[in-house]
Amino acid sequence: MSLHLFTAPPLTPFTTHTKTHTHFQSSKLSFHRTIPHTSLNSQLSISETNGARPGLPISHDLTSIDVDAVTETELKENGFRSTRRTKLVCTIGPATCGFEELEALAVGGMNVARINMCHGTREWHQIVIERVRRLNHEKGYAVAIMMDTEGSEIHMGDLGGASSAKAEDGEVWTFSVRAFDSTLPEHTIIVNYDGFAEDVKVGDDLLVDGGMVRFEVIEKIGPDVKCRCTDPGLLLPRANLTFWRNGSLVRERNAMLPTISSKDWLDIDFGIAEGVDFIAISFVKSDEVIKHLKSYIAARSQDSDISVIAKIESIDSLKNLEEIIQASDGAMVARGDLGAQIPLEQVPAAQQRIVQVCRQMNKPVIVASQLLESMIEYPTPTRAEVADVSEAVRQRADALMLSGESAMGQFPDKALTVLRSVSLRIERWWREQKRYEAMALSSVGSSFSEKISEEICNSAAQMANSLGVDAIFVYTKTGHMASLLSRCRPDCPIFAFTTTPSVRRRLNLQWGLIPFRLSFSDDMETNLNKTFALLKARNLIKSGDLVIAVSDMLQSIQVMNVP
Ligand SMILES: Nc1ncnc2c1ncn2[C@@H]1O[C@H](COP(=O)(O)OP(=O)(O)O)[C@@H](O)[C@H]1O
Ligand SMILES: C=C(OP(=O)(O)O)C(=O)O
Ligand SMILES: [K+]
Ligand SMILES: [Mg+2]
């Protein structure tokens, strides 16, 4: 393994280890330089629409490079330095499931579209997936798809078709596990958990959505539980239910329910068949379920290139946090349910801990729920919401997520714009102030070769900061080297070149990575020449830009000015 370290005037890096390729390469280079911009664009659409199954490596035109249309515009307009580092996830629901609405989100910076299997039918979700795919193919985006399982939580039924119901102070409502054939009787809520009536006790507090509405249990009659409303509010279909006794969450038999229900397994089969990029697992309790799911996926999808995201939203998941994150490909701080399971004032500390553990273990982390909750109804966020988003950006989480704001809110695009502009502003402010405390990163690699990759990335990131380079280039087949660089959170953006569209989509969840799809070889010199030519042809870089390049084939660091 060699470590190449050289600063050099334009083009000299290529002369240090050139032999047979020089001639071939320079002829290719001049070929590229004559390609007009428009023909590169048409190559982009050819390479993305060759009909191959999504998620599988497809043979691309060797002379093309694929980059997100929005990223390309941003890079051209604002230069590398001001690209957004924090990634954005949008939950897709009735407000955003149309092709045009999805496109508006992609234009607004959506990196990942999340579908929540708790709502809607598989057919509905399939149409959304298809539309996102079409958007990627036709318009050159690389929006990834995350499928989120329902999990075995206790929740209310569908409110008999109503979009919401108001519970007033003092009203008595019936929570029932009965199946109602026809219309629901007034003030009746169906509960999806059969053990509900047995597990609750008179005097328990029943919390809807972690306390948005509160009831007290006053009487049990067979399968029916009569409750009096003590905190009035709006009941939404399929809202989550928790019950509390003497100030603590009651975890009776429902704690024994499997993390992945039989319905979830069917949804997972659906996700695998559809080739989604991420599967997020709700209410993870231990690492076992994650390991089980990962081997299930590996056995069923040839590439096993679906990443498993552990949602941290229960007391158990906090207890077993390190093991769970170690076993997963990423995590979500699912503050909605977490805030219903632990006292609200403990949520910020839990968030900070989860974000830090993920960074240490090199797993992407998403901060989710209620980031801009008021924007479901209003076109501007509250000051407190902006402060909350800023804090997640300052913690350098990989991604921020919209839930109801994009799924069923009135201002999905405005909410996304707020996430985007707050991210950009806070990132820049902290870079300018040099306020980021250096985080001592412990080693994550197990083999010697992995440790070398890690050291290379740590050094490259440090060099990038002290030399003030414009960008780090990384050539990576699996994406691992790119994630190691992202973990260092360098001051400059990271251009991640990868050969497979599915790896490119998955890198879209990681902090600071700008993923490109590019066919490359084991010869760095050829790769660099090709990349410079292609990027220059699209005005994405210019002569003189200072770049550090690393690769997971050669395990090298090179510093150079773009020729
Ligand atoms: N596929 C869908 N179909 C209908 N409504 C949806 C869908 N996805 C999300 N929603 C709506 O958006 C709200 C917020 O989404 P999310 O946070 O993912 O779910 P939840 O509130 O169940 O945790 C949901 O409560 C629901 O009203
Ligand atoms: C993201 C969350 O999960 P869901 O929206 O599926 O309840 C959450 O609880 O914060
Ligand atoms: K869910
Ligand atoms: Mg949840």
Image (cartoon, grey):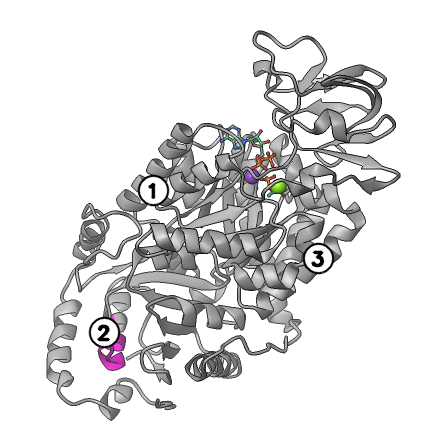
Viewer can see residue 394? no
Left or right position of 120 against 312: left
Left or right? Give the position of 388 relative to 80. Answer: right
- Which amino acid, mark 1? Ala
Q: Which structural element holds mark 3? A: helix
| Mark 3 within 8 Å of ligand 4, using the beta carbon | no
- For the residues labelled 1 and 2, the Cα–Cα distance comes to 31 Å
Over which residues does the magenta segment extend?
522-530
**Can residue 527 be seen in the rendering of this structure?**
yes
Report if the CB atoms under discs 1 and 3 are less than 8 Å apart. no
The N terminus is located in which quarter?
bottom left
As measured in the structure, the alpha-carbon distance from the residue carrying label 3 to the one carrying label 2 is: 45 Å
Name which of mark 1 and mark 3 comes first in the sequence: 1
**Viewer-proximal residue, 192 or 233?**
192
Kind of residue at disc 3: Lys
Q: Main secondary structure of the magenta part?
A: helix
Q: Earlier in the sequence, mark 1 or mark 2?
A: 1
Residue at (43, 66) in percent of width and height: 80
Left or right for 352, reference 226: left
Q: Nearer the viewer, mark 3 or mark 2?
A: 3
Residue 430 location in percent, x, y? 63, 67
Query: Amino acid under label 2?
Result: Ser
Q: CA distance from mark 1 to mark 3?
A: 33 Å
Asked if residue 161 is positioned above or below residue 230 in the image, the reply reads above
Disc 1 marks which residue?
A: 273
